[in-house]
């Protein structure tokens, strides 16, 4: 969970995971390049084979060979055709390159979406994506003018911006809809990004309140000590569990 959050394949809206445009584009590319693997029938067949291996009715070496030989061919083909695959999936924006006149397409980088010339690598011209193309409506209201706030992607991650920009330049952090658990704080928990680009969660009242968590907070009271929130923790052995920061209570 933390990996797909950090790589921005999914975002969170009203406490629920929601695929980002980058995530949906990546999914389409993978399905197009590896149709046999991203297939319900493949998953079912592989599960049956693993059951037979466990029972001793099938040799694991042969199962791995049957999977890996065609998969290796798919990998080689995907590597060879990656430029073509990407060009088919990148959205035509209708904008022309200012240097060579070719169409500009929407691509994704560490700082979010941007426009790039479809003539790459011969032409390396890029430009920022128009702000209106990156916005996503929310139920939040601007504290300055009362207009709806929209989610935008910036250099340091997501933030809320007034829909009346540039007339109104009010911004605020993306809130989780959870009150800060620190007693008497009065702030709410928001999504932030460290200088290294890693997502973490802090209090909107910072620097007056120093609450911070690398794990995503959940609006659920600890059944043991009554602490007002739990946090999601993901490990390879246990998967995703809910943990209390105060008494270390853990539940699935």
Image: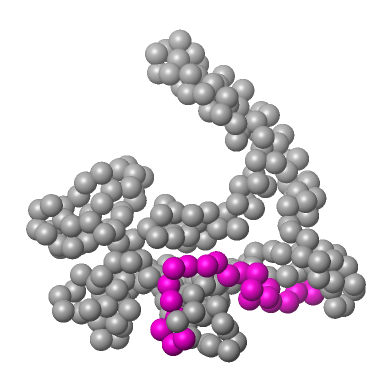
Q: Does the image show residue 121?
A: no
| Residue 113, percent from left and from top | 64, 68
For residue 142, what is the image quadrant? bottom left
Name the residue: 73% across, 40% down.
Answer: 76
99 part of magenta stretch: no
Quarter holding the C terminus is top left
137 part of magenta stretch: yes
User: 145 above or below 33?
Assistant: below
Name the residue: 84% across, 73% down.
Answer: 97
Spot the residue most to the left.
225
* Chosen colour scheme: one colour
User: 63 above or below 185?
Assistant: above
Magenta segment boundaries in residue numbering: 121-145
Spot the residue most to the top.
57
Spot the residue most to the front.
146
For residue 199, what is the image quadrant? bottom left
Name the residue: 18% across, 63% down.
Answer: 228
102 or 72: nearer the viewer: 102
Instruction: Count the numbered circles shown.
Output: 0
161 or 139: nearer the viewer: 139
Name the residue: 39% across, 13% down.
Answer: 55
| Residue 13, percent from left and from top | 44, 60
Specify whether 82 is left or right of 139: right
| Residue 8, percent from left and from top | 52, 60
User: 21 above or below 251?
Assistant: below
| Residue 131, percent from left and from top | 63, 76
Q: Does the image show residue 12?
A: yes
């Amino acid at each position: 969970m933390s990996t797909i959050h950090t790589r921005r394949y999914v975002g969170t809206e009203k406490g629920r995971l929601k695929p980002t445009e980058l995530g949906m584009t990546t999914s389409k590319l993978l399905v197009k390049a590896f149709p046999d693997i991203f297939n319900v029938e493949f998953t079912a067949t592989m599960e049956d084979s693993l059951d037979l291996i466990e029972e001793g009715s099938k040799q694991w070496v042969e199962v791995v060979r049957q999977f890996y030989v065609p998969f290796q061919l798919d990998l080689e083909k995907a590597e060879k055709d990656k430029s073509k695959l990407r060009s088919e999936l990148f959205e035509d924006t209708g904008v022309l390159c200012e240097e060579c006149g070719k169409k500009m397409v929407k691509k994704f980088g560490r700082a979010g979406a941007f426009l790039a010339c479809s003539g790459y690598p011969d032409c390396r011209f890029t430009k920022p994506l128009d702000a209106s193309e990156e916005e996503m409506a929310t139920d939040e209201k601007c504290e300055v003018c009362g207009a709806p706030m929209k989610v935008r992607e910036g250099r340091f991650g997501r933030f809320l911006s007034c829909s009346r920009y540039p007339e109104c330049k009010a911004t605020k952090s993306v809130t989780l809809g959870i009150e800060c658990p620190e007693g008497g704080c009065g702030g709410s928990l928001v999504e932030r990004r460290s200088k290294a680009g890693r997502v973490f969660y802090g209090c909107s009242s910072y620097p007056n309140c120093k609450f911070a968590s690398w794990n995503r907070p959940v609006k659920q009271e600890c059944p043991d000590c009554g602490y007002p929130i739990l946090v999601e923790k993901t490990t390879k052995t246990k998967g995703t569990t809910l943990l209390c920061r105060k008494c270390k209570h853990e539940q699935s």
